[in-house]
Structures are given as C-alpha cells and as structure tokens.
Amino acid sequence: MNPWRGLKDLPKSMWLLFAATLINRSGTMVLPFLAIYLTQKVGMTPEKAGLVLAFYGLGALVTSPVVGKMSDKIGSLRIMKFSLIASGLVMFAYSFINDFEMIVAVTFLLSVISEAFRPANLSLISDIVNTNMRRPAFALNRLAINAGMSVGPVAGGFLALLNFHYIFYVDGITSIISGIFLMMTTQKFFGEHEVHKKKLQEEEAGKIPGKIFSDSRLLYFMLALLPIPMIYLQHQSSMPVFLVQDLHFSAATYGILFTINTVMIIFIEVPLNNSLNHWSDRKLLSIGSLLCGIGFGGMAFAKDIYSISFTIVIWTFGEMIIFPASSAYMSEIAPPLRRGEYMGVYQTISNLAFTIGPWIGTTILEHYGSSTLWIGTLIFGILSSVMMLGLKQKPAAAE
C-alpha cells in the first residue's frame, strides 16, 4: 500500500497553503544569520546581539495568543496575507538600520508581524481539513517548512559572502511573493471557507463563550506538552555544545549529523503520519513523547558518531509523530469558532519553550554535566508520555 496515497483526499486549498509556506520558507535566511550579521557587520558585542534575539523571542511570545483571537474575529487568511507582505517590507528596511535601540525596536516589530503567520496558518488548516485528515495535513505543512528551511539558510550563506544586505532582500521578496500568491488564490479556493465561517459566526452571534483557560482539557494538554519542545530544542542549544566540548567532534560533524533529522523529516514524516492516521491522538502523543525522551536521554550513553546518529533517529521519529498529532489534538478540542484562539495558545507553548528551554539546558550542561542533562530529558519525556495517556479524546465541539 502506498503511504502517500491518502494525501489525495486533502483539499486543493491545503496544497495551496503548502505552496505558499514552501515559497516563504525557502527564503528564510535573516533569522539564522542575524547574530552573525549583528556582530560582524553592525559591530555589536555578542551580548547585545543575544539581547536582540531575546526581543525577537519576546515578540513571538506575546503575539501568538493575541493573533489567535484575531484570527477568529477577522479571519486567518487576512492575517496570513498581511503577515507575509508586511514582514517582507520590514525586512527591506531592517538592513539600513545601524542604531542599537532602533534595531531592538524593529526586531520586536518584525517578530510580531512575521510570527503572526503561525497561529493563523494552524487555525486555517484546522478549518479547511476534515478531522480524519488533519494529522497528514499538519505533517504536510511541516514538510513545507523543513523543505524550505533546507534551502533558505544554505542560499543565505552564499549570499552573505557576497553582501549581507542580500539576505534581507531575498527573504523579503520571497515573503511578499508568498503573500501575493495567497491573495491571487483566495477567492477561487478559499471563498467557500470564508462564507462558511461567516455563517457560523452569524449563527453563534449573541452567545457568550467561556474563558479559554476554563477548559480543563486544554490546561492538562499544555502541561503535558510543555516538556517536549523544551527537550527537542536541545538539538539547537546544548546538543552542539555537548558534541564539540564533551565528545570533541567538529562543528562540521554536528552539521552533518543534523542532516539526518532534516532528511528523515522530508522523506518520512508525511507517509508516516498518513499510515498512522487510524491511531488515536492520545496513543501517538504518548509514543512521540517517549521517543523524544529516549532519543535525547540516550545521549548520556553515546560516545561515538554511530551511537549519536542512532539517538538522532529515535528522537526524530518522536518529533515526526508528536508535532502533527499535537496540532491535530488541539484543533479537535477547540470549538470551531475559537480554533484561532486555541492555536494561538498552542503556539505560545512552543514560544515559551524556545524562550526557556535552551537556557535551562545549557545551564544544566555547564553546571551539572551532560549526563545529568540527558537523563533529565529522559525523565521528563517519560513523564510527558504518561500524562498524554490521560488525555480525553472526545472533541469539545462537533464539526
């Protein structure tokens, strides 16, 4: 049986979102090179460059819940189109600013605008894809992101050798092209969705929804999920430090090992989720959490490139399972007219993990050693896995 076959059941609008995301992500190169640009071209100290990046994280953290609610009020598509085009324009302006305070302010503004795309995108996918196809749809969305990110930073590296300003121009242009692409296809392929959404809003007018944090399923899921992105983000923070300082690998070796993760995601994630589509979210979330914990925890015992590669394969399978399943579960427990708000909270979990996860991991690595760090990831992965088994599967509202 062809594990890709089920994707034919996805609506055309999902494939258009895939194309728009792929275009946008293929030009992503400013953020990966921002610290280098600020230190080498602007002349900032590493400490100041780190502060600039912290403000980007802060902007993402405060944006998601607000944009989520806005998606329910004015529509996810409007926010996505505005985010793509406006962030592209800000990219152009960014390269001409050299003042530290202005860079901090514009970085925060760029984060608020560009990160608005994520919760709106997740909310729209939840709306246009039927419940039984959401996990493959979210996996397809992640494929667009990862495939694009395998191109953007590489191209950015070559452009930076020519002129650092080029990375801002190309990133901005691809973002604007993606926004225009959505504008051109909106009426034909998303018009029916917008009419249906408006009809639902009219039917629900006058009803007072409960507070989002009164949903016990949401609170429990957030608590169970938070350790996983914190564990996963160690591959960008403490893991490279561990490989270079403790195991004495080169930075180039880390780059080669990292491709194991990206290649697996590009070629395996979509068919894997398609083949597991009949499994419950609860089971997949538990298995994915456990694999993430075992994969990172296994690095406490890994001493050579082969054992490290094996651990990467394990936690990559966990990543490929848990992130589409978690997006699908969140979309199912969300009331139809509040999916944007719920997805905003969901994205906030990722942003919070990005804010504190790498710092906690590197701090433990520095003061308590690698074994403590990796055994800790194993323990928290197991804890999250057990908690996932307690999730309530029944959706909060009917389609």
Image (cartoon, grey):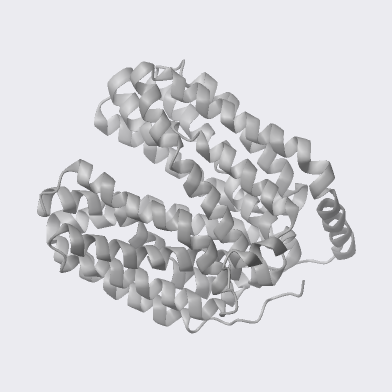
Q: Position of residue 376 (x, y in %)?
A: 24, 69
| Residue most extreme to the front | 1
Quarter of the image with the N terminus is: bottom right
Compare residues 13 and 373 and report the one nearer the observer.
Answer: 13
Horizontal arrangement in the rendering, residue 161 relative to residue 168 (left or right): left
Taking the spot 51% from the left edge, 29% from the top edge, the residue there is 171
Q: Position of residue 64 (x, y in %)?
A: 57, 50
Quarter of the image with the C terminus is: bottom right
Horizontal arrangement in the rendering, residue 207 relative to residue 257 (left or right): right
Question: Is residue 345 something that shows in the picture?
Answer: no
Taking the spot 57% from the left edge, 42% from the top edge, the residue there is 22
Taking the spot 81% from the left edge, 54% from the top edge, the residue there is 193
Question: Is residue 218 something that shows in the picture?
Answer: yes
Query: In the rendered picture of this protein, how many numbered marks are placed on residues?
Result: 0
Q: Quadrant of the rendered structure where residue 374 is?
A: bottom left
Vertical placement of 61 versus 223: above or below? above
Q: Position of residue 397 (x, y in %)?
A: 73, 74
Horizontal arrangement in the rendering, residue 82 relative to residue 230 (left or right): right
Q: Position of residue 254 (x, y in %)?
A: 24, 48
Compare residues 126 and 160 and report the one nearer the observer.
Answer: 160
